[in-house]
Image (tube, rainbow, N blue to C red):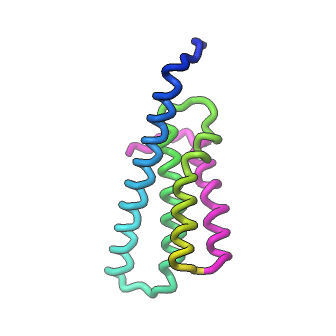
């Protein structure tokens, strides 16, 4: 294994943070738009929106972790958990703006690391 060069560490970290930020924005934007379209077209009850948002959170967490881990061979679980921190912050901010029950918030915050861990240990490639 070659020596880690200090000059490349900053670049690798910056690219990782850029990849995580882009994945979070793109994934939540696209999934929330599709979720809103589904609610509108199917004329679903507003009580179901909280559960649809939880499903979107779990899906986005998996996709964000999967996208952030492309090309990473070692230390996948810590990097996957670090990648979902912005998503968890967005979840808490969403709860503060529209409270939907503390139990659902706890379920969402506990389920998101599980989805990231599944993305870290899975061997199947997801092409984005």
Give the residues in magenta.
101-128
Residue drawn where x is 54% and y is 65% of the image: 91
The kind of secondary structure the magenta stretch mainly shows is: helix
Q: Please identify the residue farthest to the top as the structure is shown.
A: 2
Q: Is residue 126 magenta?
A: yes
Image position, residue 66 (x, y; %): 50, 45
Q: Nearer the viewer, residue 106 or 44?
A: 106
Q: Quadrant of the C terminus?
A: top left
Q: Position of residue 70 (x, y in %)?
A: 48, 36
Residue 52 pos. (x, y %): 49, 73
Camera-nearest residue between 7 and 16: 7
Position of residue 52 relative to residue 77, above or below, is below
Q: Is residue 45 within the magenta segment?
A: no
Left/right placement of residue 12 relative to residue 39 reads right
Q: Residue at x 60, y 58 (%)?
A: 112
Choose between 105 and 67: the one closer to the eye. 105
Q: Is residue 117 above or below residue 8?
A: below
Tell me the residue at 46%/28% (across/down): 11
Residue 40, picture quadrant? bottom left
Q: Quadrant of the N terminus?
A: top right
């Amino acid at each position: 294994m070659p020596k880690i060069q200090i000059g490349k560490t900053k670049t690798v970290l910056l690219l990782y943070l850029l990849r995580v930020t882009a994945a979070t924005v793109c994934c939540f934007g696209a999934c929330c738009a599709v979720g809103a379209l589904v609610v509108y077209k199917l004329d679903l009850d507003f009580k179901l929106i909280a559960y649809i948002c939880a499903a979107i959170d779990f899906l986005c967490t998996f996709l964000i972790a999967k996208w952030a881990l492309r090309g990473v061979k070692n230390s996948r679980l810590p990097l996957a958990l670090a990648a979902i921190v912005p998503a968890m912050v967005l979840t808490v901010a969403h709860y503060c703006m529209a409270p939907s029950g503390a139990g659902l918030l706890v379920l969402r915050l506990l389920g998101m690391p599980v989805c990231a861990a599944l993305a870290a240990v899975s061997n199947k490639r997801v092409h984005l």
